[in-house]
Amino acid sequence: MAGIAAGLPGTASAEEIQSESDASELPNTLTVRGTGTPTNYRFEVTGQVGVIDDSVEEGDTIVGSTVEGSVTTSEHVDKFGFSGELSALELLTGEAEVRVNGSVVGAENASGSESRRTLKVQGTGTPTQYYIEVDKLLTPVEDTVESNEKISETSVTGSVTEPEDVDRYTFYGEITTLEVSDGDADVYVDGQLVGSTDESTSESSRSLQVRGRGTTTQYHIEVSDVLTPVEDTVESYEAVSEASVTGWITEPGHVDRFTFTGEISEITFYDGEADVYVDGQRVTPDNPTTEPTRRLKVQGTGTATQYHIEVDDSLVGVNDSMESYEEVSSTSVTGWVTDPEHVDEFIFTGSVNTVRFYVGEANVYVDGRLIGGR
C-alpha cells in the first residue's frame, strides 16, 4: 500500500494506530493482495481499524474508520485488523484479492453500496468522436481527459486519435448510451472491451435521440421490440409505452433520449421538425436507414470571437455546449467563443461550406481534424 499519512486532522500513522490499540488483537482481519497491476482501493468499517505487522507504505491513509491504499504485485499484501462490520469496499482502479477473515470478498458484495466502475476510450489511429452517457454519475480521471471535452455529471462528448490517446473515467450504474461517430475507438468497461451495441446488459440495446431544431415539435416513434426512456431526459407528460413514444421537443439543447431493441418501424412529426439519431446516425421519417453523422467543434483561442458556419445538409447543437444567445438554424450557426476551455459542439450531415470569423480567432475541427483557424 502506500504508508499511513500523518499530520492531517483525524489521520493517524501506522505507529500511532498500533500504540493506541494493537490491531492484531481486533476480532476481524482484512488483507488486500496485489495481482500484478497497480490498484487503488478504499474500505470502511463500522468500528476500529488498524494496520497489522507494519504492512503499509508511505501514501496510504486511515481517516477514522476509512482506509485508502494501493497494492501491485502478489508479494504486496496490506493487512488490517478491525472491529464491527465491513461497510464499504471499492477497487478504485485495477484488480486485487481481498479477504475478510480468510474468505475472499468482492467490491460488489462487501456492502449494499454500489461499486465504482471504470471506463476507458482508446484511439486506434483515426480521429474519432464519441458520446457516452451513464444512468448515475460519471467522473473523468485526472490528467487523462483534454480540457475541451464536454463533460456533465452523467455524460461526456470527447475525441481520441492515436493508441496513445486514452481518455479514462470512473462511473456508477450502467452505460445507457455509447456512440462512436466517424472513426473507430476501443472502449473498455471494467477492463473488458465492449462495442457500441453491447455496452449494456443486453447486447441488442440501441440508442435513440430526438433533438429539437428551434420549433415546437410533436413526434411519434415506434420500435419493433422494446423502448425505454433514459431517466431525467423525458418529460412526465410525454406518452411512453413499451414500444412507442409520443413526445414534444423544442430547442437544439432539448434532447429526449431512449434505449431500444429491435428496429425503428415508424417516425412521424405531427407539428414542426426535429432531428432523430439512431446509434449516433441521423435518420428521417422517409429514410429510416442511417446516414453518416459528423462532429463539428469550435474552440476559443483566448480572444472573444464571433463565428458563422454553414453546412449543406443539417446541423444541430450538442446538448449543454451552446449559449442561449447563439443562433442555430437547421443548416448554420452564428456564435461566440473565448478561451480554449470554451468549446461549442455540433452534429451535422453533409459538408461544411462556410467558415467565417467576424471578430477574433478560433479553431474549427471537423471529425477531430483542424480545418480552420485564424
Image: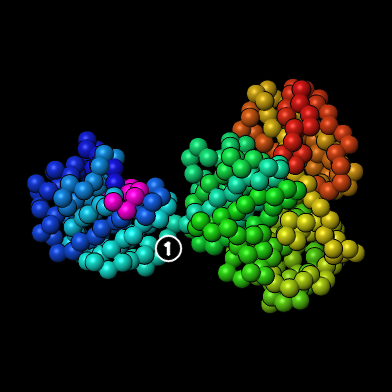
The residue located at (68%, 55%) in the rendering is: 179
**Residue 247, horizontal then vertical, whole percent:** 74, 66
Look at the image and say whether residue 92 sits in the magenta stretch: no
Residue 324, compared with residue 269, is above or below; it is above
Residue 242 place in picture, x, y as percent: 68, 77
Magenta extent: 67-75
Q: Is residue 289 in view from this perspective?
A: yes
Taking depth in this image into account, of 253 and 357 the one nearest to the observer is 357
Q: Image quadrant of residue 197? A: bottom right
Residue visible at 75% across and 42% down?
367
From what the image shows, is residue 178 above or below residue 228?
above
Kind of residue at badge 1: Glu
Q: How many marks?
A: 1
Disc 1 secondary structure class: loop
Dot 1: within a 10 Å radius of its alpha carbon, few (fewer than 14), some, or many (20 or more) residues? some
> Is residue 40 shown to the viewer in this render?
no
- Location of mark 1 (residue): 114
Q: Nearer the viewer, residue 103 or 181?
A: 103
Tell me where residue 326 sits by quadrant: top right
Q: Residue at x 73, y 27 (%)?
A: 362
Residue nearest the observer in this picture, 219 or 288: 288
| Horizontal side, residue 356 vs residue 342: left or right | right
Residue 69 lies, with reference to residue 257, above or below; the image says: above
